[in-house]
Image: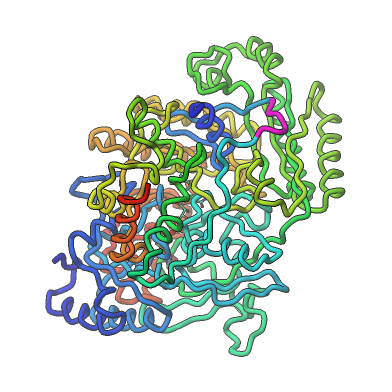
Amino acid sequence: MTSRIAKRLFHTGLLALALGLAGCEVKSNPTQEESIPGTPRLPEVAKMDIQADGPGLGKAVYTKWCSICHSDGPGYPGTVALTERYKGTEISGVLLKRTDLDPDFIKGVVRGGLFNMPNFRKTEISDAELDALANYLASSK
Amino acid sequence: MRIPPGVNEADYSAALGEFARIVGSDWVLTSDEDMATYKDTYSPWKGEEKELVASAAIAPDNADDVQEVMKVAHRYGIPIYPVSTGKNLGYGGAAPVYSGSVVLDLKRMNRILGFDETAGTVLVEPGVSYFDLFQYIQERNLPFWVDTPDPGWGSLIGNALDGGMGGTYGMLRHHYESHCGMEVVLADGEVLRTGMGAMPAAKTWQQFRWGYGPYLDGLFKQSNFGVVTKMGFWLGPKPEAFRRGTVFVPRFADLETLVDIKNYLEDTMATNGMPEIGSPLLGGGDLSDPTSAAMYIRTDANIAEMEAQAAKKGGFWSCRFAYYGNAAVIKAQWEHTKALFTDRIPGVTFQDDEVYDLPATPEQMAKFRTHPTILGIPNLLAFQIGGRSAFYPNPTSGHMWFSPVIPRTGAAIIEANRVLVDAAKEYNVPLLWFSPPVSIWPRGQMLVIGVPIREDPQENEQMRNAFRHLIATAAEHGWGEYRTPPIYQDFVQSTYSFNDHIQRRVSEVLKDALDPKGILSAGRYGIWPRHLRKEA
Ligand SMILES: Cc1cc2nc3c(=O)[nH]c(=O)nc-3n(C[C@H](O)[C@H](O)[C@H](O)COP(=O)(O)OP(=O)(O)OC[C@H]3O[C@@H](n4cnc5c(N)ncnc54)[C@H](O)[C@@H]3O)c2cc1C
C-alpha cells in the first residue's frame, strides 16, 4: 500500500523527481473515482492566540505545526515514515496514538529535526508552546 | 558566544545591547542551542567543520524595528542575513551564506496587512506562510485561491525572492512574477517602496507593478541589496471548474511534436494549468526493465523493441494537461487540445482524467485524485520524497535540488538526460536515470533532481562533488541553474560569465552603492561585498 502511494506521489508531486529514483511511473490508466491515497484534508484552522499557559495550547500547537505531516492517514509523510519505522512493533506511526512519548524526546526532535523533518526555531514554536506541545503529546491518548 | 567575522568584541556586545533594546531581549538569541536551530537541517556539510552557522539571531516584530536594527548593524558593521520563514529546504534553510552572520529572522512578522477583495491582491509581511494565507481565505470564504509551492509552511516573500514556484494558473505559478509592489529596508536603514508605492497616496500599489521610472523590484530577487518587509501578491480567482486530460503518443520520435503542441497551447493560453510530461515506459522504478525509457538513455536500448512495449503500456510519452475556468470553456479547450494532436500525431490516444465543479465541499475534495497544490491547497505531501517508506526504506536527511533550465524542445529533454546521466555515472552515484522536465513556467522547461543528503560525511562529499560536476557539465551545454544551495552560489554565478562576468561585476557595483559596508547577506547568489571579494 505505502509503496503504491510513494510511487504515485513521485509522479503526482509538483516536482516529479529523483533521489536516485528519478522519473517514476506515469500511471496510464487511473480510474476516475480513485482518490490520491491520503490527500491531506484541509488544514484545520489553529489559532495560536490562546493564552500561553491556557489548556488548549498544546493541541493548538499540534494542529498548526504537526498535524500537517503526522495526521492519521497515508498522505502524511511523518506518519508514513513512522509507520514504516515501527512496522512489526506495538508502536503506532500516528503521533497522537503513541503511548511511549517522553516530553524531552519530543522537544529534542522539534528543535533538532530528524531525517527529513526539519527543525523548528523559537520564532515558530516558542519554548512555552513547545512545553505545552510536549505535554499534550506525552499525555493525550 | 560566537562573534561574527570581522567584528570586534566590544562593538558586537554594544550592538547586541542595542538590538535587545529594539526587539526585546527574548528575541536576541545567541546560545549554542539556539544557533543550532539556525543551521540548515538539509545541509550538505552536515556535522562538518564547514557547516554554515549564525552567530546570533534577531527576531523583530515589525518594519520599524527592522529599520532600527539595520541602522545599528550599519553603524557597527555587523553582517546580517534576513530570512522570512527560513524554510528554504533544499536551497539552504535558515543558515546564512556567510558563516557567522547574524540572522534577521522575520517569522514573527506574520500579518496579512491588506486584502483587496475586488482586485484579488494581498499585501503581506515576511512571516506569512501559504498555510496562513489559505486559512485566512477559507475563514472568510473569499472567492480566491492561493498559488502555493509544495511546502505550505514556506513564506510568500521568501519563496518569491528566491525565485520559487507553485502549481496552478500559468500566470501565477512563478511567484516573483505574480508579486506587485514591495517595501524594502536598505542596508543603512532607509526605506524604499517600489512601483506605485513610491507615491504616498497611491491606491494601486498592488495593481500596477511598473510604477514610474526604472523597475527596481528586480534588484531584490536572488540578491542581497535589501530586507523586504512587505510585498504585494496577485491571487487567482477560484475557478468554476477544473479539468485534466492526458495525451499519449506511440513513438519515441513523437516527443518532438508533443512538446511543440504543448508549447503552442501554453503560448496561446489554450491551457492555463501546468502540463506534465512523462512516459508510461518509466515503469514503477524498475531500473532493470530493458524496455524502460530510462534504459534508452542509459544504454541505447533498441527503440523498436521499446515502441512495441509502449504499445502495450498505452504510449511512449504522455503529457497531462490541466485547465481552470468556466466548465464549458475548459471542455472546449480540452477538445481543441485533442484536435491539434489528432491532426499531427498518428496513433495518439487520449484519456479524460478528472473533471471537478468548484468550489467543492471538503468531502468532495477528500476524494480528489489531484495533487492538492494543483488545486491551490497548501500541504506537505512532497516531504515524502526521500522520507522513509516501504518504497524507500533508507531515508535521507534531506536533499539539495539540482535544477538546470533547458530549451523547450523534445530533443533537449533527451539530450539533457543523456548528458547528465553520463555525468552522474562518472561519479558513480545513482542520481538520475530519466527526469521528465517540469514546465512550471509557461515559457520555461527545466529538470529538477533531488540529490540526497545523509548523516555520513563521506557519502555527502561524494554527492557534493557529483552536484558540482553536474552544474559544470550542464553549464558547458548552456543549461544554467535557476536557483542553487549556498555552497554552489559562487560557482553557479561564475557560469553566467558572458563578457568577463559583467553580470557579477554590475551586481558588485550595485552592492557597493546600496550597501557600502557590505553587511547584508554577503555572498548570497555569488555577490560579495568589496571587503570579502576574492582577488580575481
Ligand atoms: C520536499 C520539498 C519540496 C519543495 N517544493 C518546492 C516547490 O514546489 N516550489 C518551490 O519554489 N520550492 C520548493 N522547495 C524549496 C523550498 O523549500 C521552498 O521554496 C520554500 O518555500 C522556501 O522557504 P521560505 O519560503 O521559508 O524562504 P526563506 O528561507 O525565508 O527565504 C529564502 C531566502 O531568500 C532570502 N530572503 C528571504 N526573505 C527575505 C527578505 N524578507 N528580505 C531579503 N531577503 C530575504 C534569504 O536569503 C533566504 O535565505 C521544496 C523543498 C523541499 C524540501
Q: Is residue B160 visible?
A: no
Look at the image and say whether residue A33 sits in the magenta stretch.
yes
Residue in view at x 67 percent, y 65 percent: B141
Quadrant of the image containing the N terminus of chain B: bottom left
Image-quadrant location for residue B59: bottom left
Q: Would residue B288 appear left or right of B347 to someone viewing this image?
A: left
Q: Is residue B291 above or below residue B499?
A: above
Residue B395 drawn at (x, y percent): 36, 34
Q: Would residue B505 appear left or right of B457 to someone viewing this image?
A: right
Look at the image and say whether residue B262 sits in the magenta stretch.
no
Quadrant of the image containing the C terminus of chain B: bottom left
Q: Is residue B50 above or below residue B344?
A: below
Foreground pick, B480 / B454: B454
Q: Main secondary structure of the magenta part?
A: loop
Q: Is residue B45 visible?
A: yes
Residue in view at x 61 percent, y 56 percent: B147
Q: Give the residues drawn in magenta, as a range.
A: A29-34
Q: Would residue B240 appear left or right of B416 to someone viewing this image?
A: right
Residue B351 drawn at (x, y percent): 76, 30
Q: Could you tell me how many numbered marks the image carries? A: 0
Residue in view at x 61 percent, y 71 percent: B122
Residue B320 drawn at (x, y percent): 69, 36
Q: Is residue B411 above or below residue A135?
A: above
Question: Regarding ligand 1, which quadrant of the image does it lie in?
Answer: bottom left
Residue in view at x 67 percent, y 49 percent: B442
Foreground pick, B6 / A10: A10
Q: Would residue B355 appear left or right of A22 to someone viewing this image?
A: right
Residue B278 drawn at (x, y percent): 62, 31
